[in-house]
């Protein structure tokens, strides 16, 4: 038990085929809380192998078709994230890559590769100006008022929860509205639509 001052140590135990939102919805809420209340948050497992969250384990896990780049405070650390930027840069040569998606300030990592030049994109409204300040971000058409933006195979969402709305929009694009609605209803998720972005105004961008 916590003595009231020591951080509460919270760990999620990951196993193959875990339901992503079961972890990341609660983790997102705790992550926000952890800025004010001492706690450590960890994802733990039995080894360092990739953990598939698909229903079946896929052979050749590293040959990816879709890359989703999350955001968060880690994206502000240029040195820490340079290997991830390098990885993304290398993946631009991957012929299998069908879609690349960013959530929140994850757009800054992809922007730094130079691969978003000339494309339309959005990002977290609270960090909008900061994302525009990273290397190679000036050639991008940043759209302030959008829950998410689609430019060909590049899908970028606004902050945090917008990533789930974008993902539902992408499922609709891939599988149709009935299927995205089936998922949304199963998640009991209240979705904002692509152009429905109250946060751009709340954060003074429009
Ligand atoms: C910026 O983009 C160019 C062109 O793709 C690339 O060569 C360069 O490495 C990028 N800068 C960084 C910091 O990745
Ligand atoms: C990019 O955004 C502009 C508006 O800023 C729009 O006119 C254009 O059609 C968009 N391009 C794509 C590929 O969606
Ligand atoms: C989508 O759902 C509606 C209402 O349940 C149904 O009438 C329609 O046939 C479905 N469309 C497809 C493509 O499954």
Image (spheres, rainbow, N blue to C red):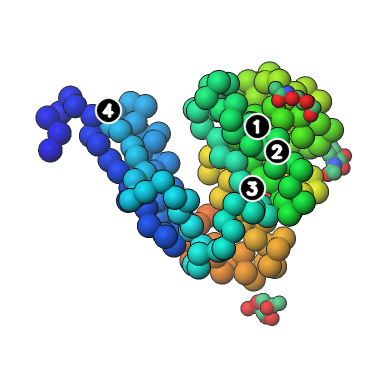
Report which quarter residue 39 is drawn in.
top left
Asked whether mark 1 and ligand 1 are closer than 8 Å, the reply comes as yes
Q: Mark 2 points at which residue?
A: 90
Q: Residue 95 in the image: state x and y as whole percent.
A: 77, 51
Residue 56 visible in the displayed image = yes
Residue at figure coordinates x 33%, y 51% from the top left:
46
Q: Which is nearer the N-term, disc 1 or disc 4?
A: 4
Residue at figure coordinates x 34%, y 39% from the top left:
42
In this view of the protein, which residue sits in the foreground, 82 or 121? 82
Task: Residue 38: give its label.
Answer: 4
Q: Which is nearer the N-term, disc 2 or disc 3?
A: 3
Q: Name the residue under label 1.
A: 86
Residue at figure coordinates x 70%, y 68% from the top left:
176
User: How many numbered marks are there?
Assistant: 4
What quarter of the picture does the N terminus occupy?
A: top left
Q: Residue 6 in the image: state x and y as whole percent.
A: 19, 27
In the picture, measured across the screen, residue 161 lies left or right of residue 22, that is right
In the picture, measured across the screen, residue 93 lies left or right of residue 37, that is right
Image region (quadrant) for ligand 3 = bottom right
């Amino acid at each position: 038990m916590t003595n009231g001052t020591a951080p509460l140590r919270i760990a999620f135990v990951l196993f193959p085929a875990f339901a992503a939102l079961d972890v990341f919805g609660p983790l997102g809420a705790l992550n926000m809380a952890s800025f004010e209340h001492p706690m450590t948050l960890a994802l733990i497992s039995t080894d360092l192998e990739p953990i598939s969250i698909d229903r079946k384990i896929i052979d050749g896990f590293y040959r990816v078709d879709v890359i989703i780049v999350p955001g968060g405070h880690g994206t502000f650390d240029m040195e820490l994230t340079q290997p991830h930027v390098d990885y993304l840069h290398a993946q631009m040569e991957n012929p299998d890559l069908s879609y690349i998606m960013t959530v929140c300030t994850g757009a800054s990592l992809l922007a730094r590769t130079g691969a978003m030049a000339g494309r339309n994109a959005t990002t977290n409204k609270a960090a909008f100006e900061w994302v525009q300040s990273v290397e190679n971000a000036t050639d991008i058409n940043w759209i302030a008022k959008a829950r998410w933006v689609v430019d060909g195979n590049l899908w970028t969402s606004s902050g945090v929860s917008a990533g789930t709305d974008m993902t539902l929009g992408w499922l609709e694009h891939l599988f149709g509205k009935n299927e995205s609605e089936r998922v949304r209803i199963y998640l009991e998720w209240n979705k904002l639509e692509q152009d429905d972005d109250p946060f751009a105004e709340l954060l003074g961008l429009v």
